[in-house]
């Protein structure tokens, strides 16, 4: 399963309090800012920020529990100890009052539809930009009426001029409007049922 870049938390969860305490700590924010620039070890972070290594260790543990920092790589010291390399988890934090699972399910349900609309719009754009459709139309006209092919070809070229509306953009805009209307209707139904 794909790794999620969103950290969804409910205001009523204990995890939210822990996350808030971690984010509001000045030391934790300094460590996050340091890790935003580069992946690093506890020792290097402590030296760079001029903090005791025990303080850095404590805050890194809190940041890992809050899923804001990862330690996926390590190397061994001369003494054979594992030295972790810490980096940001690259997550967006979304704090919602309640019904997180419902929100997450709705977003996951709409995502495939949005991606399909984007894909179809791209295919339409490729077809209309590469003039595949006008060429096919001209060939069909030539086969259907060889005698009057010039006049029909000119009519087909006039219909498919570059100044015609961007069909792909209109399709994408219509799809986006439909998705937004669906979301609004779903939210209104939930509010009316409560």
Image (cartoon, helix red, strand yellow):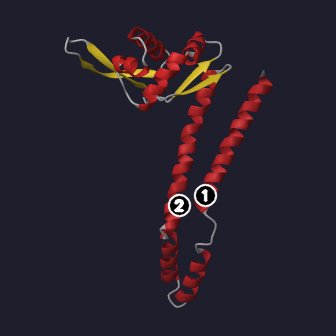
The quarter of the picture where the C terminus appears is top right
Q: Give the percent coordinates (x, y) of residue 53.
A: 38, 11
Residue extending farthest to the front is: 50
Q: Give the percent coordinates (x, y) of residue 83.
A: 29, 16
Q: Is residue 1 above or below residue 58?
A: below
Disc 1 secondary structure class: helix
Residue extending farthest to the bottom is: 147
Q: Is residue 170 above or below residue 21?
A: below
Q: Is 75 on the left or on the right of 5, as rendered? A: left
**Disc sitting over residue 69 in the figure:** none
* Residues at marks 2 and 1 touching, judged by CB atoms closer than 8 Å: yes
Disc 2 secondary structure class: helix
Q: Residue at x 49, y 30 (%)?
A: 5
Which residue occupies the foreground of this view, 132 or 61? 61
Q: Which residue is mark 1?
A: 169
Q: Which residue is mark 2?
A: 125
Q: Give the percent coordinates (x, y) of residue 36.
A: 45, 30
Q: Residue at x 62, y 55 (%)?
A: 171
Residue 68 seen by the camera: no
The quarter of the picture where the N terminus appears is top left
CA neighbours of label 2 inside 10 A, class few (<14), some (14 to 19), many (20+)? some
Which residue occupies the foreground of this view, 32 or 194? 32
Q: Is residue 166 above or below residue 90?
A: below
Picture quadrant where residue 166 is located: bottom right
Q: Is residue 168 above or below residue 117?
A: below
CA neighbours of label 1 inside 10 A, class few (<14), some (14 to 19), many (20+)? some
């Amino acid at each position: 399963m794909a790794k999620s870049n969103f950290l969804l938390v409910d205001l009523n969860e204990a995890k939210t309090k822990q996350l808030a305490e971690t984010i509001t700590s000045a030391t934790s924010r300094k460590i996050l800012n340091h890790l935003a620039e580069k992946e690093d070890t506890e020792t290097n972070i402590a030296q760079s920020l001029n903090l005791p290594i025990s303080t850095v260790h404590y805050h890194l543990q809190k940041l890992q529990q809050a899923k804001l920092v990862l330690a996926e790589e390590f190397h061994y010291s001369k003494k054979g100890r594992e030295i972790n390399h810490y980096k940001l988890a690259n997550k967006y934090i979304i704090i919602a009052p309640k019904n997180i699972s419902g929100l997450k399910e709705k977003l996951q349900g709409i995502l495939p539809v949005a991606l399909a609309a984007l894909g179809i719009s791209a295919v339409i754009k490729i077809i209309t930009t590469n003039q595949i459709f006008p060429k096919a139309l001209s060939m069909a006209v030539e086969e259907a009426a060889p005698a009057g092919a010039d006049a029909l070809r000119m009519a087909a070229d006039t219909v498919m001029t570059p100044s015609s509306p961007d069909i792909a953009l209109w399709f994408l805009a219509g799809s986006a409007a439909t998705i937004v209307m669906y979301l609004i209707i779903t939210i209104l139904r939930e509010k009316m049922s409560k």
